[in-house]
Image (spheres, rainbow, N blue to C red):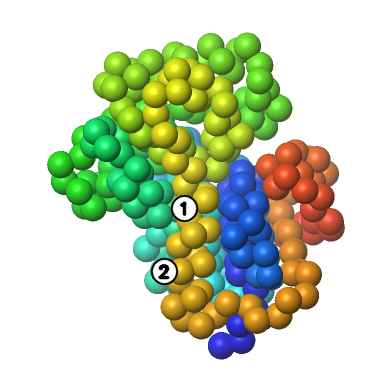
Amino acid sequence: MNSDKPIGVFDSGIGGLTVVHALLKQLPHENIVYFGDTARVPYGPKSPQVVREYAKDDTEFLLSKNVKMIVIACNTVSAVALDVVQKLANIPVVGVIIPGAKAATSASKKKRIGVIGTVGTISSNAYANAIRQLDETIQVFSQACPLFVPLVEEGWIDHKATEMIAKEYLFPLSVEKIDTLVLGCTHYPLLKNVISNALKGTATLIDSGEATATEVMMVLDELHLKNSSREKPNLQFFVSDLPAKFTQIGERFLGSKMGVVKKVGAGRQ
Ligand code: DGL
């Protein structure tokens, strides 16, 4: 397999760019093809059956781009459809749940971990199960925070309303005296400050995107698939709805300019 082939990354929409940001930091020479299903976002409130169907389409699109590996940036997809992607793809697949769970397990001293995410991710119990599989003595406290995604997309990062909502969502977790909190959604890294303040700085925040980038690096190393070229990497972005909003908000997520974003057809063939 050619190591200069791109890594394929997909998400329900814009949020997965936080994972691309983490990948670019840790693997600055990798070519990346990103697909954001902006026509069908959000995935978080949808049923697992529907998300599994979407995951199949998203995977097929990336496979058509001849990627060497697939990274499922979306927590909701990683939680309910990892097996769908693995079954379709004959290449390595990394989701965000297991790397996030591993990072949280090693960070927690008191063995009391909080997990926040979309309704889909939290209802699946995927993080709690993965953490308990690593260490069954750990107690996990989960909380869905559905309003965080629209608040971040609205750009209400340092907004009073966001602070109030964060306090409301996180209060039950602070009562449980968690010492570690998994940011189990692509959008939450942008709310790190608000979330940390709501918990009065008492918990270590685990960015599952960063943990995933570390895992990707390890897999590429192990399989000798790291790109040996030292050229500037080629980043390609595809979306299923018009690109204008994606480009505008996406640069906030990515932390840099994005270049051309292409729209692909519904169903993606
Ligand atoms: N990307 C989703 C996740 O990480 C959040 C946005 C959505 O609900 O689609 O779960």
Give the residue furthest to the left: 137
To which residue does mark 1 refer? 211
Which residue does the image show at 63% across and 78% down from the upper left? 227
Say which element carries label 1. helix
Q: Nearer the viewer, mark 1 or mark 2?
A: 1
Amino acid at circle 2: Gln
Closer to the camera in the image, 90 or 251:
251
To which residue does mark 2 refer? 86
Which residue does the image show at 46% across and 27% down from the upper left? 145
Closer to the camera in the image, 198 or 62:
198
- CA distance for labels 1 and 2: 20 Å
Picture quarter with the N terminus: bottom right
The answer to whether residue 161 is left or right of residue 99 is: right
Classify residue 261 by image quadrant: bottom right
Ligand 1 near label 1 (Cβ, under 8 Å)? no
Local packing at callout 2 (Cα closer than 10 Å; few below 14, some 14-19, many 20+) is some
Closer to the camera in the image, 136 or 145:
136
Classify 236 as above or below 149.
below
Where residue 154 sits in the image (x, y, percent)?
70, 27
Classify residue 249 by image quadrant: top right
Amino acid at circle 1: Ala
Residue 126 can be seen, yes or no:
no
Where residue 192 sits in the image (x, y, percent)?
55, 31
